[in-house]
Amino acid sequence: MTEANRRLVIGCDHAAYPLKEQLKGFLLESGYKVEDVGTHDDASVDYPRFGAMVAAKVSSGEFQRGILLCGTGLGMSMVANRFPHVRAALCGDLFSAIMSRKHNDANILVLGGRVIGQTLAEEVVKTWLQTPFEGGRHQDRLEQFDSLERMNFPESGEEK
Ligand code: RB5
């Protein structure tokens, strides 16, 4: 794991504030540096604002990895994936966490604070952070994302 990968940006809304705090403690104890963009209490906030703050920092390259949390994880996923170069993956199990790294090179992990418990969330985060991208044919597929962003994805192509 590179030094850059040990720097994380994390954000949440009120629905996932308790889990964000627990995970931040877990990450700091595990030796990660964490920039927390909020929210910083359980007062109701709009999740798109916090999702955008984290996604913008990953999209720009300021951070290589980010973590987002809302009640279900769905809203944060939708927001984050609107940003160029962001590949946000909502993971509620270890298999998804592993595959989102191996095949999708996910750079934002999304968790549902009202869905997943603390112990599983810590395992998912640890696994996601430690699993490398496989590259190869998966890199070719990720490169097609850029074409999609330019809205000129070919209608048919050769299967690999
Ligand atoms: C907030 O009530 C809730 O809508 C939000 O946390 C999230 O689940 C949205 O997708």
Image (tube, rainbow, N blue to C red):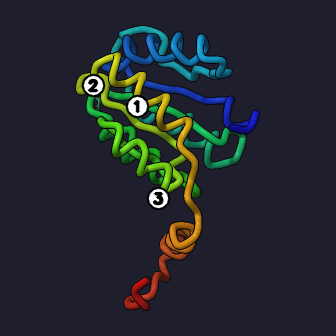
Location of residue 117 in the rendering, given as x and y in whole percent from the top left corner: 28, 19
From what the image shows, is residue 134 above or below residue 71? below
Mark 3 or mark 2, earlier in chain: 3
Residue at 28% from the left image edge and 27% from the top image edge:
71
Location of residue 52 in the rendering, given as x and y in whole percent from the top left corner: 51, 39
Q: Are marks 1 and 2 in contact (CB under 8 Å)?
A: yes
Respond yes or no on whether mark 3 lies under 8 Å from ligand 1: no
What kind of element bears circle 2? loop
Find residue 22 and report its image quarter. Answer: top left
Residue 150 visible somewhere in the drawing = no
The total of numbered circles placed on residues is 3
Q: Residue furthest right?
A: 3
Residue 124 visible somewhere in the drawing = yes
Front of the two marks 3 and 2: 3
Q: Residues within 10 Å of mark 3 (few under 14, many from 20)?
A: some
Q: Which residue is mark 1?
A: 124
